[in-house]
Amino acid sequence: MDVVGIAIEALSTREREVLIHVMEGFSNREIAGQLFVSPETIKSHLTNIMSKLGARDRTHAVVLAIRTNQLQVA
């Protein structure tokens, strides 16, 4: 069990990369441009991330990733 009391699947390297961009305030389209993928791919990554973390939205996903040490804040 983790900090929030539910089992959390580990995020992939790419999923963590997407979340870092979300944390920095970028839109899906901006993230897609920076990672050289389509906005639909970013949306798919975010859907997977939210499912793995049990998050309600992208902001909640960032908070949960930080709380479960899957995302480090510098």
Image (spheres, helix red, strand yellow):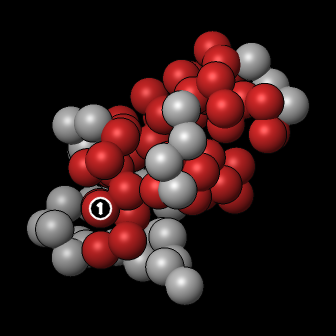
Foreground residue among 50 and 73:
73
Q: Which residue is drawn at 37% across and 71% down?
A: 66
Decide if residue 10 is on the left or right side of residue 68.
Answer: right
Placement of 55 over or under 68, stated as above or below:
above
Placement of 26 over or under 38, stated as above or below:
below
| Quarter of the image with the N terminus in it | bottom left
Other residues around mark 1 within 10 Å, as few (<14) / some (14–19) / many (≥20): many
Decide if residue 47 is on the left or right side of residue 4.
Answer: right
Q: Residue at x 48, y 70 (%)?
A: 70
Foreground residue among 57 and 33:
33
Q: Which percent across, then down, holds residue 27?
A: 53, 32
The answer to whether residue 36 is visible is yes
Placement of 63 over or under 30, stated as above or below:
below
Number of labels in the image equals: 1
Q: Which residue is drawn at 44% across and 28% down?
A: 47
Q: Which percent across, then down, holds residue 2?
A: 25, 74
- Tell me the kind of residue under disc 1: Leu
Foreground residue among 59 and 24:
24
Q: Which percent across, then down, holds residue 62?
A: 37, 56
Decide if residue 13 is on the left or right side of residue 47.
Answer: right
**Secondary element at image label 1:** helix
Placement of 20 over or under 14, stated as above or below:
below
| Quarter of the image with the C terminus in it | bottom right
Decide if residue 49 is on the left or right side of residue 30.
Answer: left
Judged from this view, the residue extending furthest toward the bottom is 74
The answer to whether residue 19 is visible is no
Judged from this view, the residue extending furthest toward the left is 5
Residue annotated with mark 1? 64
Q: Which residue is drawn at 25% across and 49% down?
A: 60
Foreground residue among 11 and 36:
36
